[in-house]
Amino acid sequence: MIRFIFRNEIAPELRRRTRVLMVLVSVVFVLLIGRLWYLQILQGNWFTYFSENNRIRLKKVPGIRGMVFDRHGRLLVDSRPSFDLLFVPEDSAEPELTLRRLAHFLNRRERELLSLVEENKTRPPFEDVVLGKDVDWRSIVAVESHQLDLPGVSLRIRPRRSYLTDSTATHLLGYVGEISSPQLRVLKEKGYSMGDEIGQFGLEKRWEDYLRGRNGGQQVEVDALGRRVRVLHEVEEVPGQSVFLTLDRDLQETAYQALQGKEGAIVVLEVHSGAILALVSSPTFDPNVLARGITPEEWRALVENQRHPLNNRALQGQYPPASTFKIVVAIAALEEGLIRPETRVFDPGYFTVGNRSFRDWKEGGHGWVDLHKAIVESCDVYFYEVGSRLGVDRIAHYARLLGLGEKSGIPLDDEKAGLIPDVAWKMKRFGQPWFPGETPSAAIGQGYVNVTPLQMANLMAVVVNGGTLYRPWFVRRVESLEGKTIREYGPERIRSITLKPDTLERIRKALRDVVNSGTGTGGRARSSLIEIAGKTGTAQVAEMRGGFVKSERLPYFLRDHAWFVSYAPAGQPEIAVVILVEHGGRGGSVAAPLAKKVIEKYLSLKSQPDEPDSRQAAAAKQNHADRP
Amino acid sequence: MSQIPGRPPQRNRTMQIDRRLISHFDWPLFSLTLGLILLGILTIHSATYSITEQHAGTLASKQLYWFMLGLVAMIVAFTMDYHHIDRLAYPLYALVLLLLLLVPLLGTAGGGSQRWLHLRLFTVQPSELAKLAIVVVLAKRLQYDEPHHGYRLRDLWAPFLLVAPPILLTLLQPDLGTAVILFLIFFSAVLIGGLRLRSLLYLAAPGIISLPIAWRFLKPYQQRRIWTFLNPELDPLGAGYHVIQSKIAIGSGKFFGKGYLQGTQNRLDFLPEQHTDFIFSVFAEEWGFLGCLVLLGLYLALILFSLEVVVRAKDRLGAVLALGMVAIIFWQVVINAAMVTGFLPVVGIPLPLFSYGGSSLVSMMVAMGLLINISMRRFTF
């Protein structure tokens, strides 16, 4: 090809094209000017009308949150209509006069209302100021009947979250609150806006995407007094979806009552699925207060409370498992073939390693002890001995297999993993080797060992279901407004542990006798209605040197924690029940009776017709959908 | 570097100021630029006047500081010979790419996307710098003479590969507006630089054919989202509300406007982003149709004078470079004006030289500086 253009020189075509471009650009600008002519000259008066008094406003219509039902379709969480009192300063010719009248009708102080308006001075005057949230009936009637005297004052219906179970299941259900500005920054894309309700904790937070209602709204034209002339555009709000739990409302209530006045946790789960029937942490608080809009003082009181009501002790509380841990050591020793069930150990009341001596809880000891007796009477020396022979690493191996020292994976936030120590951990944490003198404490679940009540419930389930570790779960399904199941959940196996059938059989037999033999430590859990099996534990909080001190005589925060891990019925186990009472004293006398109470309630609920009360759920739903 | 015939001899590529350079200084472009910026600062002052009383004026004076900084950058941009671009193109491009990559790692979010990088003293928006970087690399790639019958597709894949990474990175922020502008810059430069008509068809055809097919694969909610984007009326509580408020502001300005600082729509915070993307609405409300005529006239003059620079450029490097700079200004002005008047969907595109924003102002001033640079060196040899 002949190149007749020098490099870098501009082809005449480029110049020509640029000239054409100049014309095109000018045409585009003429079009733009035409558009402005249309808007400003032809439509100018029309738009001027709209620009006066800000004739076009947005009204948000919040979408109602989805409902939560228990396993029998009984309503646990709902949204009820509430009324907020609003004031638009711009719409009132004399705001002060209006507020003075309003204060008179409502029996509120005028200054209080004025200062609320004053605080919002920086915002545009067409935006409403909230004078009262969730106002009572008297105020609603007063405002409605004096509408004409109160220009700019209006009521806005708003769904407000209502927890029908009050404080009973707070730690599991969680609560909602107004969206915070950092949350809003992240979630704006998902369609959240200021003032929206959002799940802040528990189920409400984890299932937010299903439960949340989508906001609707109206673009309305208003007149000079702020009264609506017509709706220009409307977007319908969409209610959230319903969530059905595995929880049993009555059992939850019983567990909650059992812990009244105490601190601790109760976990009840199905041993063959890991489904949670009840989960209580005490002390607790009323989620309705948070949904209503908590005041900073109330919030501070909650956070600074010495007894930490915000903590979910069932999965965040980490306690030494004490004697309940003997189940783990027994399994380890039998599986490793280190002992046979008949192997006997002599317990003189103490055990020595080097120059350290470890006491049995029973002064004078238990004498000759085999595995069965060791579990039934909770003999410490037997486990000091067996644990020392096993070594801490083998104990840790089995403890971890059984789900201790790791998060159970329950779909709730901030679960704690507990701690199962071994040689490597000690080296990493303290830079020291493991001393043989530390193994006996570990073998009776003291020292560094820490577990959560939920982990212990899981452990109990593994022991009775033949070795399957399930992830605890509590949401069975999510249902759309039309009643269609959108998501279903079921048991989720974490792992199956192969254990000799004989191992578990021996342990179950012993656990049965802990409650039922007459010599066992768990006699206080014995029920005439149902056979219960379990293991007691009394966790020392502070190491006691020299002599026995009755726990009740210690200062509260040094008293022992009381454990009872159990299952029922002993023959055909269905549920695992774990009780922990912080600083409660002895497991046998404090925790065991609570387990009995919960298990007997379970039995009585079972004898009632089990058919899910779908009619109630349907009725509640109808009601929900009909709301304005 | 290879010896290329027609290149200016070494001595003229230095910083020394030639008497001829001064006599050929492009005063019209320079004064149009300064005029638009000053008008912009006045409008920013009006737009932010009422946000809250204690903030009044701070954004306008901040913009004034950016203007000082931009002036220095602009002077540098027209003083040094633009042929240095040939050497600086890739390092500049690499630097901007690096900044763009840093945004998702270290950047801060604003309005739902991550666009800003916090430096010690100020924040930068690397996607603004990307506009310049793209023009510079394109000029370097396309500076050699155009093929006899225009560019074929195979001539274009290399420049496209250079342009694609910044487009993708801005798209991921997500900053759809800037990504569109970047693509339009590429498209304009290639088209005017000499795209073969047949190649244009080849480029467009697969896209047009695949559209309906792709549409079917989208989920209903995705389709709905695209519809609302194209027609804001379908989203009366979001974009549609902004557009109608913007139209009310502009329309209520009528012929003479409400007067400076007298706009009411803006005063009441009805307009979103009133000092950045919707600054035109504020101006139109206060100055009316007459003011808009003047403002758009200034922009048109700026663009036509700049295209004149393209026509008169001494060599192809200068012409393509100038063309790219005009493309930046033109597309942003048109899309922004069309957006606020309800012609085009709402995408975040500032009005160049006018909207609040340091990165944008400084890079637009550099763009104008380079245009002046090319203009005043049109006779040097």
Image: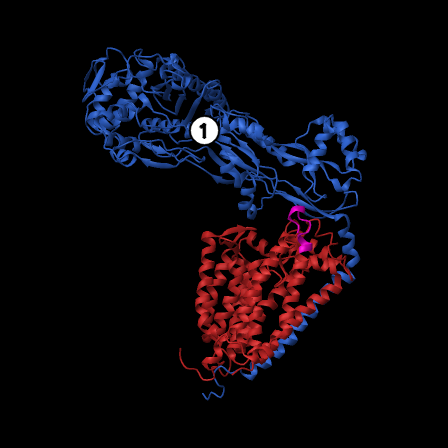
Chain colours: A blue, B red
Q: Say whether residue A117 is magenta.
A: no
In the image, is A51 to the left or to the right of A244? right
Check the picture and name the quadrant holding the N terminus of chain B: bottom left
Relative to A175, does residue B359 appear above or below in the rendering? below
Graded by Cα atoms within 10 Å as few (under 14), some (14 to 19) or many (20 or more), the crowding at tag 1 reads many
Asked which quadrant contains residue A547, the reply is: top left
Q: Nearer the viewer, residue A342 or B216?
A: A342
Q: Position of residue B69 (x, y in %)?
A: 56, 61
State which region is magenta.
Answer: B45-56
Between residues A157 and B81, which one lies in front from this camera angle? B81
Q: Is residue A441 above or below residue B28?
A: above
Q: Nearer the viewer, residue A444 or A243?
A: A444
Q: Chain of mark 1?
A: A
Q: Is residue B166 left or right of residue A436?
A: right
The verdict on residue B46 being magenta is yes
Q: Is A505 positioned to the left or the right of A413 in the image?
A: left
Q: Amino acid at mark 1?
A: Asn
Asked if residue A59 is positioned above or below residue A410 in the image, the reply reads below
Q: Name the spot of residue A294 as percent of width and height, x first.
A: 58, 30
Q: Quadrant of residue A274?
A: top left
| Residue designated by label 1 | A312
Tally of numbered tags: 1
Res. A263 visible in picture = yes
The residue sitting at 21% across, 29% down in the picture is A336
